[in-house]
Image (cartoon, rainbow, N blue to C red):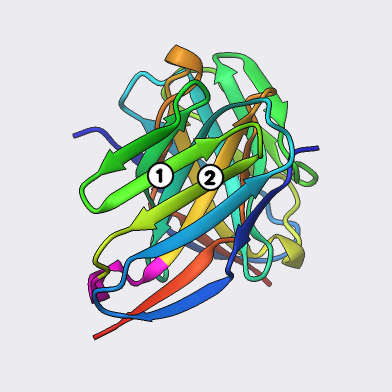
Amino acid sequence: KQEVTQIPAALSVPEGENLVLNCSFTDSAIYNLQWFRQDPGKGLTSLLLIQSSQREQTSGRLNASLDKSSGRSTLYIAASQPGDSATYLCAALDSSYKLIFGSGTRLLVRP
Amino acid sequence: EAQVTQNPRYLITVTGKKLTVTCSQNMNHEYMSWYRQDPGLGLRQIYYSMNVEVTDKGDVPEGYKVSRKEKRNFPLILESPSPNQTSLYFCASSTLAGGGETQYFGPGTRLLVL
């Protein structure tokens, strides 16, 4: 059974820092891995999707990488801003087309 | 505008009173799914559907039913709700082209079962 884990559970950084969020999965047979952002009490916003055949995707200050062989994905946020404060979730679409979520990393960027 | 809509957004009900939460998407997506989000447990998939008349159980299907009679709609049915189904529910959709693309989420339905 696919399990997705995110470390750390919470992170507090000063504005301007570059930071890395980690996501690991137990079964490398995935179709894709997706990163989401969730603001308190709100829905999920897709940030980046990496297909199983890809190694990374970039959007603005965000860069996500995927290493299927090690079962890991990272989300890199450059020059963090207070507006980046949110919970970040990763999710793997497994071989049965089930979408399995990690428990999230709660990020606080201090001004 | 491409979107996933859910109704109602908020619902308070009593134990045993059947309810339906609707989900609709306007992007002609094959894949639709339902999730519940609970503090400390994260997002868990309830049911998913890969096309019309095709549904499969996710990780927590007990107490829920779904149907996919039309491509755009994927209602979630709680035939006899219980307090442990109090949760925040999300519907999502995506195309399956290329093995699966971006999941689009609805705004959520907050359910309280008394």
Identify residue type, mark 2: Ser
Of residue A8 and residue B68, the one placed in the foreground of this image is A8
Reading the image, the residue beneath label 1 is A64
Where is residue A73? Give x, y as percent: 53, 45
- Give left or right: position of A105 versus B42: left
Secondary structure beneath label 1: strand
Task: Residue B87 in the image: state x and y as whole percent.
Answer: 61, 63
Instruction: Check the residue under mark 2 and report the chain it is in.
Output: A
Q: Which residue is mark 2?
A: A73
Q: Chain of mark 1?
A: A
The disc label shown at residue A4, or none: none
Residue in the image at 45% along x and 14% along y: B98
Label whose residue precedes the other's in the sequence (2 or 1)? 1
Asked whether B14 falls inside the magenta stretch, the response is: no
Badge 1 crowding class, 10 Å Cα cut-off, few under 14, some 14 to 19, many 20 or more, is many
Q: Is residue A43 visible?
A: no
Identify the magenta region. A81-86
Judge left or right: residue B12 versus residue B57: left
Q: Are marks 2 and 1 in contact (CB under 8 Å)?
A: yes
A85 inside magenta stretch? yes
- The image shows residue A9, relative to residue A96, as above or below, that is below
Q: Position of residue A40 (x, y in %)?
A: 41, 71
Residue found 45% across the figure and 31% down from its top: A55
Instruction: State the residue at coordinates (30%, 51%).
Output: A62
Q: Secondary structure at mark 2?
A: strand
